Image (cartoon, grey):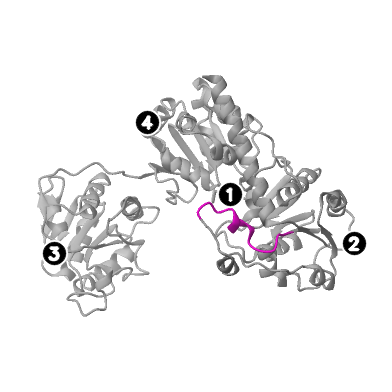
Amino acid sequence: MYSDKEIVRQLTSLLVAHGVTTVVLCPGSRNAPIVHTLANHEAFVCHSVTDERSAGFYALGMALSLSSPVAVCCTSGTALLNLFPAVAEAYYQKVPLLIISADRPEAWIDQMAGQTIHQPFVFEPMVRKSVQLPEIKSGEDRWYCNRLINEALLALQHRDAGPVHINVPLSEPLFDFSDRPLTDVRSIRRVKWTEVNVTEMGEMQEVFAQSPKTLVVAGQMDRRVVIPQGWQGTAAWLYEHLSNQHLPLSAASTFDTLLAVLDDAAKEELRPDLLITFGGSVVSKRVKEYLRQYPPKVHWHLSESGELIDLYCSLSTVIESPIELFFRETEEWCVEKEEWYRLLWNSKCGELLPPSFDYSAMSVAGEVMKSIGESPCTLHIANSSVVRHAQLFPLSPSVRVCCNRGTNGIDGSLSTAIGYALLSKEINYVMIGDLSFFYDMNALWQDALPNHLRIVLFNNGGGGIFHTLPTLSMTSQSETFIAAPHHSTAKGWAEAQGLTYMDVRRRESVETAIQLLTRPDASAPVLVEVFTSAVEDKRLLERFYLSNKARQNIINSSNK
């Protein structure tokens, strides 16, 4: 009989899946659901040791003897602290010792409840990984718990081995057990590509061969990855400007717009069998929602560090490898692969109406992006609306794109761009919104601004992105606090700091502004301030999506 608590059942299944089946069990009531379940599961070899200090060292010795991970499970309170000496020894000997501690629910910590101390992360910094599991009350909790346990178990022997701590909060009732069998749970594995054996290689090639719909999503990268022609020609590729990838065989850089207008049947048709991801952040919220709603059968994430990233909630394998090495050494897999899935994505994207707007933040962003790139340059894009508007338009392969997308904040975008430009010899363009600019306007407060700095400031009188959020309805009073409306202009500050300044308030001025921005021999940095209406920008953007939605409906009707 096993505990009815899903957190315990999930932990048990993943211990089996990761091969951690030798366990030292210490007595207690709070950890009884875990102890009872492990002791009654045929996969586990269990040893009983009453004293937790001894138990830790027992498990340490077993791990040394087996050359594999061994777990020790204890109850809550100071029982856990008695394991610290063994944890320290395992840390310095690099022994894969797994500590599983039961705990009270977080609400009862520091409330004079029995056997309660601050257990999460108590062994830092002498563990390879510490995780605090959530009590499972929702689907997101279930996914989060699964991911954390997988992360912890993979950390036991990743590169340097060492101790890992899993803290398990358990609410009462504790002693409900049943004969219901454990269900299968997702086990995430890590493969070190340079050490992959023939069997593993064959299994992965078989997965690829049996996945006619292979989709590759490239996240933010600071360099262009050389992708072999075989991979470009067979898989479908989704990439944003921030990825700095330019793949001539793929037209799917407009995927965000496409996903905004497709119906459910078309989304199902595009659902991948195999998803391969690499790189950092992805701006598009739509692609994240799409791949979570229409998950692939298999998801491989390529990571040079072996880091576990489960953005799409479907990760099955982390492939620890240099990105280019993986694609180069697997190009032969593509020989027998048909390219219809790539062509399907390209065809769908090709059906979209090209972006065309009346005077707005979008139209000016498009004109700027069309006009740069005749010679190598760098485009710095600030977060919020600007980075999303930029994705609507094509960009020359000669342009390198930078953005503070690690945290997605508006603070520091201008400072980062100027710091980059100071050590760069090429023209550096900055596209930035008003809140981002005024938050970081002190970036201009220095005497050494480079003449090859070009700033395009989009000023719509506040946080324009808040007007486009689908579920946010602002009153006139709440708008003051949410969107931060203002009547500021950068003119005085820019001129005081020695920049050449120009304002743009209508379409007729855009061409002159572009000429000023792209002059290679400017005698001072340039700031062009583009004034638009947030309400009108929103209206034009909605009209663009509605027009594409109507076009899709017409195409679907004609195909029936």
Q: Which residue is drawn at 59% across and 66% down?
A: 476
Q: Which residue is drawn at 71% across and 42% down?
A: 395
Query: In the image, 334: left or right of 381?
Result: left
**What kind of residue is marked 4?**
Glu
Instruction: Point out the tag, 1 or 4, that comes first from the N-terminus.
Output: 4
Q: How far apart are marks 1 and 4 (CA)?
A: 29 Å
Is residue 490 at least partly visible in the picture? yes
**Quick check: is 143 in the magenta stretch?**
no
**Quick check: is 470 in the magenta stretch?**
yes
**What kind of residue is marked 2?**
Ser
Instruction: Point out the tag, 4 or 2, that comes first from the N-terminus.
Output: 4
Displayed quadrant of residue 51 = bottom left
Helix, strand or loop for disc 4: helix
Query: In the image, 105: left or right of 457?
Result: left
Is residue 194 at least partly visible in the picture? no
Instruction: Point out the tag, 3 or 2, that comes first from the N-terminus.
Output: 3
Q: Name the residue under label 2.
A: 523
**What kind of residue is marked 1?**
Gln
Q: Mark 3 points at which residue?
A: 26
Q: Distance between the residues labelled 3 and 2?
A: 75 Å
Instruction: Point out the tag, 1 or 2, that comes first from the N-terminus.
Output: 1
Magenta-drawn segment: 458-471
Residue 44 image point, x, y percent: 15, 49
* Camera-nearest label, 4 or 2: 2
**Which disc is residue 398 wearing?**
none
